[in-house]
Amino acid sequence: MPSDLLLAIKSRGDVKAIRNGLITIQDDPSFRFPHRSGIFGVIGVSINNLVDEINKSHFQQQLLERELSQQDKLATLGKLIAGVAHEVKTPLAIIKTRIQIWQREIANGGSASASVTNREEAMSIIVKEIDRLTKLVKRLLVFSKPVSDKKELLNFNKLIYQSVALLQMEQDNNVTFTIRTDESIPLISGNSNSLEQLLINILTNSVEASGSEGSVVVTTKFDKDCDEITLNISDNGSGIDSSIMDKLFDPFFTTKPTGFGLGLSIAYEIVKSHRGRISFSENFPKGIVCTIVLPVNYKEVV
């Protein structure tokens, strides 16, 4: 057999070995080409070195991502602690002041009638502030773990109607609700309590933004190709300033005179735990649209 033909056959085998090795590396990144002589041996060594560098870069990238994630967590924790301190400081100061007033009355031997009147007023204020602290603690407990491990098959449209009905019973305004649901939406996998809380939080914001004579429109749509449902909740309120749009989900950030600023933070955590997405945009000619996209099936975030 001529030497050229032998060389061609050998080269074909070497090319096939390189090709098979590259396919193996795709499935097993730890695979390396064995040591060989000749030009194909040089190619094998070059590929091995390249894969080693890629793995090293990938490992360094993972370390950097973990460090950045840890920094984000610490930054969020710092904001949370600062927010809790701010919210707790005022009620505690009020309670302390009222108790000090009692102490001065007792020390000065104040009149019985004045003492009783002051005590009744002070007790009322103290109970109110304690209730506020209790509410804050409950919200923080929900924020710390908004989604339980239990999931079930749910009728999402039915959950929307139930949430709207519940909100209408509790609200004392004349906000008009319009609900348009996509009846092709299948049963979805989720946690009913968490999703109901999500809906109540967003709907409450829309109602408060709409005012006493406003309107809220709720629509759902099923995307069969992506196996996702899209929920839009829109109002005709005053809208949200674009400069604060990126702060809406920050714990304790609020533009309301009352409240703790945890509602949207909790909503964000619930959506994220269901592997979904949530965003806000302008509702023309006025108001805001909250868009929530949820997969029909999800796996809990570990």
Image (cartoon, helix red, strand yellow):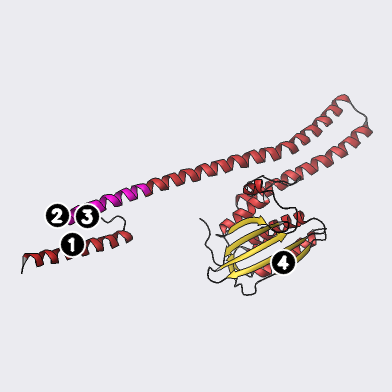
Residue at left offset 22%, top offset 56%: 33
Task: Calculate the distance from the C-alpha at mark 4 to the C-alpha at mark 1.
Answer: 68 Å
- Quadrant of the rendered structure where residue 127 is? top right
Q: Are marks 1 and 2 in contact (CB under 8 Å)?
A: yes
Q: Is residue 293 left or right of residue 261?
A: left
Q: Which mark is residue 171?
A: none
One can see residue 62 in this view? yes
Residue at left offset 88%, top offset 35%: 118
Task: Calculate the distance from the C-alpha at mark 1 to the C-alpha at mark 3.
Answer: 10 Å
- Residue for badge 1: 14
Residue type, label 3: Gly
Task: Calculate the distance from the C-alpha at mark 3 to the C-alpha at mark 2.
Answer: 10 Å
Residue type, label 4: Gln
Identify the magenta region.
34-57
Q: Are marks 3 and 2 in contact (CB under 8 Å)?
A: no
Residue toward you, 2 or 230: 2
Earlier-in-chain disc, 1 versus 2: 1
Q: Position of residue 151 (x, y in %)?
A: 58, 64
Residue type, label 1: Asp
Q: Position of residue 174 (x, y in %)?
A: 83, 61
- Of helix, strand and loop, which mostly describes the magenta segment? helix
Earlier-in-chain disc, 4 versus 1: 1
Say few, some or many: other residues with alpha carbon within 10 Å of mark 1 (under 14 / 14 to 19 / 20 or more).
Answer: some
- Residue for badge 4: 162
